[in-house]
Image (cartoon, helix red, strand yellow):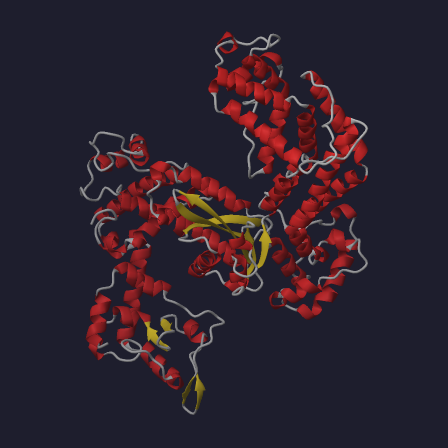
Amino acid sequence: MSAQDIDAAVKQLSDGKRYSLLRQHMKPSKDFIFPVTYDGGCNRSFKQEWLSEYDWLAYSEHLDGAFCLPCALFTDERQTRGVLVNAPFTKWSKKSEKINKHASLSYHRDAVELAANFAANVEHPDTAINVKLDSRVRQNVMRNRSILTAIAQSVLFCGRQCIGLRGDGESSQTASGNPGNFMALLKVVSEHNPLLKEHLLNPLLKNCSYTSPQIQNDLIEIIGKDIIQAKILEEVKEAQYYTVLADEVTSHNTEELAICLRFVDKQKNIREEFVEFLKVQRITGLHIADTIKEFLCKTGLSLSKLVGQGYDGAPNMSSEKVGVQARIRADAPLAIYAHCSGHALNLVITHSCKLPNVRNTLDKMKSVCLFFQLSPKRNGLLVDICSRYTVETSRRKPLIDLCKTRWAARHDGYTHFYQAFVYIVYAFEVMTGAPDAVACDEAFSNWWDTKTAGEAASLMHSITSFDFIVTFLVVYQMLSHLSGITIQLQKSTIDILEAYANVHEVVTLYKSQRQDMAPVFGNIYNQAVRLAGKVGVEPSMPRSTGRQKHRSNVSAQSPEEWYLINLAIPFTDYIISELGEQFSQLSHRSAGLLGLVPSVICEKTTVDITAAAEMYNRFLPSPELLNQELARYKSHYLQKATEQRPDSCASAMKDINETLYSNLSVLLRIASTLPVTSCECERSASALRRLHTWSRSSMTQERLSALALTHIHYDVVVDLEEVADRFAKKHSRKMELDSLLLA
């Protein structure tokens, strides 16, 4: 390009673009390798320290040359300028001569001064020279910033509370119809803010009310992306190591990928933070992996620091050949894949309940729950009976739905069913017109149609069999051990060793009960007999035949023996087997990290962390001293009482002295970063359902992600003055006029 073409291109730059080039011009990283050229009899290249020596110098990776930024952007008489202004400087052997001479030129000093004044005006508009000279302009700037912060505060409130902003008549203050939450909130706020009220009723310029959808989107993006997301990403970069968690969710026929990051912050707290909703056209392993890698690259997160991946067990995510985890490990070999422990536990329960009598019992329970939930009259009858015949009425519903995906919620459903079982039978008796039916409100005692009465009779017959009662109690009692661990595994602060300890504890309990099953089942059986007696059911066992294919058919002397052999023992075996299979990967990954936990190494004679050391060798400051460091580490905790020894990676990481144990502190930080569950993505998906409602289904992807960030990170402090500053820089051309909000 000629000097004239360059001058024309520079003059067309907006103030915002010029400021961005001046302050945010690309700087090579410290490990960047500059191209080498043969010059002056030897190989030479640009030096990183030159950028520190000359703060006005910029390096162009594309041209492999240096420029003077102030001169390139603000010089006059460009036609007379040459190298460093219109052309890159590449004669590295002449560096001292050329660059020092350029620094002494008068036009260079003038350009540096112009650049400094320009940046100061953009960054501090209220202290600009023209503002200082004109008090009226200064008052306008302060007035408009006050209005802008009030508008931003209303946008922030709507985003925090996950309520829609738009309305029918928001384009005009006098238009009829619903103005939308945003405009309605502004009107309420304006009643206590005379300046805002005057602006809304009589803006200085009719086309600059700053309440348009475009301005809303700008403020939403600044709050969600430029402040909240940027703050999280900055913390992730400071943490050095991170894990990516992802889960796909469908919303209004659109596939959305929730992205969360797990890392250890400055205070050594394990955190899992939502950072983005990404739209994916297809949900194959290739497309999802490319989407994740593109996002990490765009946000400046290096794949070399990625140490873990956490997804569900779907084939497109978990496949070792074509799944997301395999494709990402091709670029990030240290990114260990972890199947979400929450999903794994749900699979344990689902597979364990495949025994025919267990499956049939759960189907009958589901039918009973739906029978009452789908009819206000039926549910009203059940509530009326419960309120009449129970002392405890604090529960909102006598029956709740049996959740398919979350065992903690399903266990609550089992509890409600057990506690309401007798009253469910009473309600069925009322519907079927049984002569000994209990008393109830007159509104429910009559007028049950034939179809309802028939369904009630069928369901009552199915749940008042002794087989149903004893099977339900076996499932309810035996799976109760998993309700607590479900909640523990959903915590974002849990580390891999703590998760392993929780699972191992439950497996040990099941194995202990399995070795002496008779007394355990005896208690359950006695409870079943008592419950059956309340509804007039006698203990019995299914008939046996000479040949049976579809259910257990082992002969027994009594109902208790039959259900012990054919139900309790096989069901417990299923649970133990599934726990071992679903959590085998967790056990394998934990084994190599146990040597990092003081409570473990103090109990063992020898500790082997070779596998972990070899895998993360390049992250360790002095790997050759690791064994000596481990010996000091063990000796240190042997001198402490047992209760003072940390028993997890997270607690050990907080307790360790990073100066004394530099290698082990790195390994503990990585171990704490490794994924356990992807439940944070599930929680983000729940937020998406609250946000992306049918009335807001047409919002853009950028607005959706920014609003999700604002809503999910409810407790992140957003400085409205920073919002105003960023808005001013985003529209820096307005700073040259007499008011921030006037154009």
Residue drawn 72% across the image and 46% down it: 504
Is residue 492 visible in this depiction of the protein?
yes
Q: Is residue 307 left or right of residue 300?
A: right
Residue 78 on image: x %, y %: 22, 75
Residue 430, position as x, y percentages in the image = 56, 12
**Residue 597 pos. (x, y %):** 71, 54
* 462 w.r.t. 129: above or below: above
User: Which residue is pictured at 75% across the width and 37% down the height?
Assistant: 569
**Left or right relative to 406: residue 552:** right
Nearest the eye: 277 or 159: 277
Residue 480: name its quadrant.
top right
Residue that lies at the very extreme toward the front in this rendered image: 546
Q: Is residue 427 left or right of residue 161?
A: right
Q: Is residue 715 left or right of residue 185?
A: right
Is residue 164 among what the camera can see?
Answer: no
The answer to whether 693 is drawn above or below residue 736 in the figure is above
The residue that appears at 50% across and 18% down in the rendered structure is 452
In the image shown, does 503 or 463 lie closer to the viewer?
Answer: 463
Image quarter of the N terminus: bottom left
Q: Viewer-proximal residue, 330 or 559?
A: 559
Q: Position of residue 618 (x, y in %)?
A: 60, 68
Q: Which residue is more in the foreground, 19 or 485?
A: 485
Instruction: Specify the quadrant of the image occupied by residue 204.
Output: top left
Question: How many marks do you count on the picture?
Answer: 0
